[in-house]
Amino acid sequence: MPTPLPVSDIPSLSVVVPCYNEQGVLPEFHQHLCAVMDRVGRPWEVVYVNDGSKDQTLVVMRDLEQQDNRVSSVNLSRNFGKEIALTAGLDHARGTQGVIVIDADLQDPPEVIETLVAEWSDDVDMVYARRRAREGESIPKRFTAWMFYRVMAKLGNRVVIPPDTGDFRLLSRRALDSLLQMRERHRFMKGLFAWIGYPSKAVFYDRAPRAAGVTSFNYWSLWNFALEGITSFSVLPLQLGTYLGFVISLLAVLYGGWIVLNTLLFGSHVPGYPSLMSVILFLGGVQLMTLGLIGEYIGRIFNETKNRPLYFVESYHVAGVPQAGVKP
Ligand code: UDP
Ligand code: MG
């Protein structure tokens, strides 16, 4: 953990930015951020998290540290994925009043931070940015995102995840401290943000296409993300297996009765191979699917029970503290 600072130097707001291969946009992002935070006019710091980037992101971060004494950084020991990188940043954020979570690729316009802060008051613990349009994203991606939020809304039992909302938001210190108490490995952040509760408020904005670089999310990772969301927040799929099995057994009993009746009345004239095969294959499929579902949950139990630390820090830098890049 970073060295404590004199009270006067502790920022009241921290901006946490996970970065993976963002060398292209980071300087531009930082410029935008500074302009906006100066207008906001509260003491602030930014915490850049280098999530094991394969490009020069770390070098760019070190440059920013040199130029600007409001830059803190956390350099993780390898790529841990956005959710964990974000958690590392939140762990190191010192903002006494609150934190802002934002992506580095300028898809979450830093200008919106002004609105987030403006809408924030003592009665509101979380102000989240909700996107109005998904420019530059293909129709299938929009559709799958839309589907995902609708499914989650049905499955989330009591935890309501606001639709079309990413991680871009402002959290009060109280909300952040609550969030950080949840140390599970499978960190579906949107779900965790919603799970902690507290009064929250939405602010609408237009999501721009990525400024540079490429998105690290493809359909496979989006699918895994959705699976993570569903299995971390609902056991309904497990129950689904039970109901599916129940309905199919019922149908099988009815079908069996019909076969017996048919044989009694008209005798056996067809060997019954096709129906036998289709029933066996169908049931086999259902069983495999249900087993797979159970496997998803068991895998997650397995990962949680190992109880490993969420991440390791290779080096970090605290804004305004001279010894840059110290190893803890
Ligand atoms: N990111 C990260 N680690 C990863 C992948 C992404 O820290 O393994 C960061 C990335 O640098 C960006 C944010 O998470 O700041 C969102 O990533 P991206 O733009 O690729 O996702 P999308 O906007 O497509 O959801
Ligand atoms: Mg992005």
Image (spheres, helix red, strand yellow):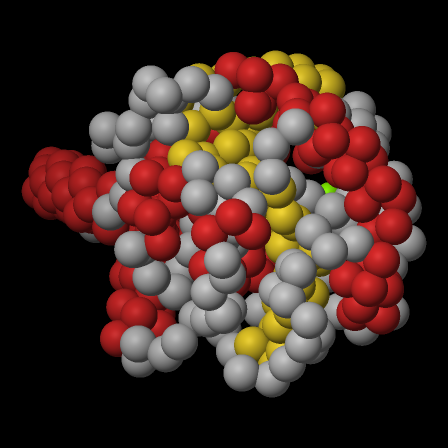
Q: Residue at x 64, y 81 (%)?
A: 326
Which of the pair 207/177 is nearer the observer?
A: 177
Compared with residue 312, is residue 101 higher up or lower down, i.e. above or below? above
Residue 229, how many percent across, how many down? 42, 46
Which of the pair 147/188 is nearer the observer?
A: 188
Compared with residue 120, is residue 236 higher up or lower down, i.e. above or below? below
Residue 282, how many percent across, how many down? 36, 52
Compared with residue 241, is residue 73 higher up or lower down, i.e. above or below? below
- Residue 326 seen in the current view: yes
Q: Quadrant of residue 194?
A: top left
Answer with left or right where residue 166 lies relative to residue 155: right
Q: Which quadrant would the C terminus be assigned to in this image?
A: bottom right
Residue 55, how many percent across, how many down? 85, 70
> How many numbered marks are there?
0
Which of the pair 4/256 is nearer the observer?
A: 4
Answer with left or right where residue 189 lies relative to residue 51: left
Which of the pair 75/261 is nearer the observer?
A: 75
Residue 174, how many percent across, how many down? 33, 39
| Furthest residue toward bottom | 327
Q: Quadrant of residue 96?
A: top left
Q: Residue at x 79, y 54 (%)?
A: 68
Q: Quadrant of residue 160?
A: top left
Q: Residue at x 85, y 41 (%)?
A: 31
Q: Residue at x 76, y 38 (%)?
A: 33
- Residue 272 seen in the current view: no
